[in-house]
Image (spheres, helix red, strand yellow):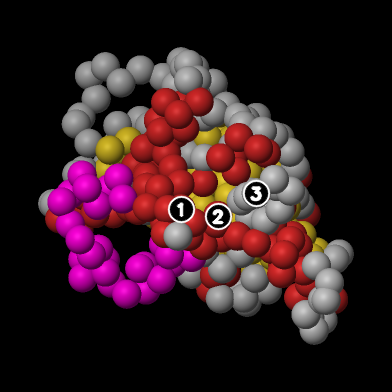
């Protein structure tokens, strides 16, 4: 009964809003299982009764079930973990990735992960529980990919639930995040059902108001030029913020955003420390790779790179 009540908190609001009885036929069985997993992970970590124990506490207490130490550490970690929205970076397919918690202060965390790292990429956003297991971190089983639209829907829901003011990304404490778990599922489901039932996509724009069109530009290094030679040139460009020895974020000058006069459509904005990320640069072997999300930024980026290190590149 308690599980059913928790699942209703996660799934019932969007189902009632769209007047549907089963979203599996609309979104597919895979997402049906994932959404059930979101509710289940919330349920087993909630505290019930006079002793305030969770389902996991009862599972782990003596007589202890026969589980290896890693499995017990994962289950105990899942009990204490809170779902949050994370930004993906430094993806190593089949091995690991770095997650930055967008709703809590703290340092990014490297998680060991195989399957998700084969599909996720830099700047993707996911809602998931990050679970400490002995000397490393892993993700829980229920993972929801969040678009920018779903992220804004989530932020609005959290602000409303907690009575927060302003439009910036809210910052929460651990217990606040635990209580907000159903909002993550509902925000994702609201967005995906709306997209599935009204499939006409809105025009996607970046923060400059330009249509989204992803570009990847390759600059081969000139003969005899080393990566350190290019890095030295890029480090002198104020707009290029280094993130390691071979990676830079191209940041726009910080300014107050205004939506006045822009085209209608969904605005896609990637932020880092309050500054808009215009693109990324990465040294890979004998190449410098510049990635941006519009034709205009492609031209500007080429000009900046050429001015900084033109003679060292082909």
Callout 1: SS: helix
Counting residues from the start of the chain, the first of labels 2 and 3 encountered is 2
Eye-nearest disc, 1 or 2: 1
Q: Magenta residues?
A: 12-37
**Image position of 183 (left or right of 115):** left
| Front label number (2 vs 3) | 3
Q: Position of residue 275 (x, y in %)?
A: 55, 28
Any part of residue 19 in sight: yes
User: Disc 1 designates what residue?
Assistant: 6
Residue at x-position 48% and y-position 65%: 37
Residues at marks 1 and 2, CA–CA distance in whole angstroms:
8 Å
Question: Which badge, 1 or 2, comes first in the chain's sequence?
Answer: 1
Q: Nearer the viewer, mark 3 or mark 1?
A: 3
Number of residues whose C-alpha sits closer than 10 Å to that of mark 1, classed few (under 14), some (14–19) or many (20 or more): many
Q: Quadrant of the C terminus?
A: bottom right
In terms of depth relative to the viewer, which is nearer, 11 or 253?
Answer: 11
Asked if marks 1 and 2 touch (Cβ < 8 Å), the reply is yes
Instruction: State the CA–CA distance, disc 3 to disc 1.
Output: 16 Å
- Cα gap from disc 2 to disc 3, whole angstroms: 16 Å
Q: Which residue is mark 2?
A: 42
Magenta stretch: dominant secondary structure: helix
Return the residue found at the far bottom: 66
The residue wearing badge 3 is 49
Q: Position of residue 43 (x, y in %)?
A: 55, 57
């Amino acid at each position: 009964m308690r599980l059913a009540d928790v699942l209703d908190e996660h799934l019932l609001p969007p189902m009632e809003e769209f007047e549907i009885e089963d979203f599996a036929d609309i979104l597919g069985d895979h997402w049906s299982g994932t959404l059930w997993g979101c509710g289940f992970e919330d349920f087993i970590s909630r505290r019930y009764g006079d002793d305030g124990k969770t389902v996991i506490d009862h599972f782990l207490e003596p007589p202890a079930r026969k589980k290896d130490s890693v499995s017990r550490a994962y289950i105990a970690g899942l009990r204490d973990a809170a779902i949050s929205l994370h930004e993906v970076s430094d993806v190593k397919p089949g091995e690991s990735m770095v997650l930055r918690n967008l709703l809590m202060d703290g340092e990014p965390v490297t998680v060991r992960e195989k399957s998700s790292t084969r599909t996720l990429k830099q700047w993707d956003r996911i809602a998931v529980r990050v679970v400490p297991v002995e000397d490393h971190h892993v993700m829980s089983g229920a993972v929801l990919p969040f678009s920018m639209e779903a992220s804004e829907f989530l932020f609005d829901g959290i602000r409303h639930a907690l009575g927060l003011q302003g439009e910036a990304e809210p910052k929460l404490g651990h217990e606040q995040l635990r209580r907000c778990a159903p909002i993550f599922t509902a925000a994702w489901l609201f967005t995906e059902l709306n997209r599935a039932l009204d499939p006409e996509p809105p025009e996607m724009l970046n923060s400059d108001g330009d249509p989204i069109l992803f570009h990847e530009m390759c600059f081969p290094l000139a003969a005899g030029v080393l990566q350190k030679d290019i890095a030295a040139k890029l480090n002198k460009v104020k707009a290029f913020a280094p993130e390691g020895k071979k990676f830079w974020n191209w940041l726009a000058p910080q300014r107050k955003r205004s939506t006045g006069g822009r085209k209608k459509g969904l605005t896609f904005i990637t932020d880092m420390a309050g500054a808009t990320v215009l693109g990324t640069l990465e040294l890979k072997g004998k190449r410098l790779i510049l990635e941006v999300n519009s034709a205009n930024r492609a031209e500007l980026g080429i000009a900046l790179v050429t001015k900084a290190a033109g003679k060292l590149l082909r």
